Image (cartoon, rainbow, N blue to C red):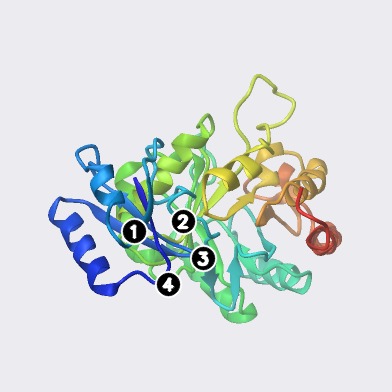
Amino acid sequence: MIVILKENPDRDQLEGFIAWLNEKGIKVHTSVGENHTILGLIGDTSKLDIDLISALDIVADVKRVQEPYKNANRKFHPQDTVIHVGNTQIGGGTLTVIAGPCSVESEEQIVSIAKAVKASGATLLRGGAFKPRTSPYSFQGLQEEGIRLLKLARQETGLPIVTEIMDTAHLDLFEDVDVIQVGARNMQNFNLLKELGKLRKPILLKRGLSSTYEELLMSAEYIMAGGNENVILCERGIRTFETYTRNTLDISAVPVLKALSHLPIIIDPSHASGKAALVPTLAVAGVAAGADGVIIEVHNNPAQALCDGPQSIRPEVFDTLARKLYALHDFLKTQPTV
């Protein structure tokens, strides 16, 4: 349920109304917009009398929300959420370009790639320390040492770091990580999501391999219900009948999720395609569709990469792509909204 307040509501009446709702076990999420203030009521609102609430002097309108996700719902929060990371932001009309290797392999590798992608315009550095692999015999990442090397690359370049968490037991290791990534395989690891909800740092939440939009938003809801509203959605391709590409990039996820939710959304063309040659085209498509950013795998020697070399582009390719993405984004801002 959402309650739309009249302009300049009486403070005492508003505080009394919120206190009354809290007594009934209803949590209240307040969203202040340019013209209205909206109260999002979270909990069992089935027994609340809409007519009674509508009759209050401070209330302009009351609406029931049918979707099971509340905190992530644009009806609760009409304004786009902007998430600040270091000296940059995600959302709010800014194009965020996250780049780096699939896996951290060595100090020389991660630092050199970090310097290269920063020079090309990347605003955050990605790199896997813990790697969830299909095969138990594949490279599993440098783990704690990988996080140490990511921090070193951040120190060298100033780029905030993004890396994936797999288990609640690793939370202490991520205390100094700027953005924690939840991979597709862990999108519905609800115990992990609950623990991340207790933090106050950005969470990059990837869509599961076969998950619906609602399932993705419900996973975001788990994090937000704990008090952490800094959630970034990521479309990274879904599993379909097509086998030519690693996954199928669901480009419609961008406008659909922007309509359903206020959370920023980025795309991952690397995992979506599994083919380096397709990454630039899919990245351009994502920005054209209105994505708030991209996350791209870049490696200085893809043929020798310990993980996902076939989908990693070289730094010189990334340099050309990044300039094209920023130019496209700047052009789109000059065009009327359709």
Label 1–label 2 contact, CB within 8 A = yes
Residue 11: horizontal and vertical position, in percent? Answer: 28, 73
Q: Residue at x 42, y 72 (%)?
A: 176
Closer to viewer: mark 2 or mark 3:
3
According to the image, label 2 marks what residue? 77
Do the CB atoms of the residues marked 2 and 3 lie less than 8 Å apart?
no
Q: Earlier in the sequence, mark 4 or mark 2?
A: 2
Q: Earlier in the sequence, mark 1 or mark 2?
A: 1
- Judging by the rendered image, the residue that carries numbered circle 1 is 29
Amino acid type indicated by mark 3: Asn
Disc on the earlier residue, 3 or 4: 3
Mark 3 or mark 1, which has the lower sequence index?
1
Q: Secondary structure at mark 4?
A: loop
Residue at the disc numbered 3: 35
Q: Earlier in the sequence, mark 2 or mark 3?
A: 3
* Circle 3 Cα neighbour tier, 10 Å, few/some/many (<14 / 14–19 / ≥20): few
What type is the residue that disc 1 sits on?
Answer: His
Q: Kindly identify which residue carries mark 4.
A: 176
Residue 169 position in % (x across, y down) = 30, 54
What SS does tag 3 mark? Answer: loop
Q: Residue at x 23, y 47 (%)?
A: 52
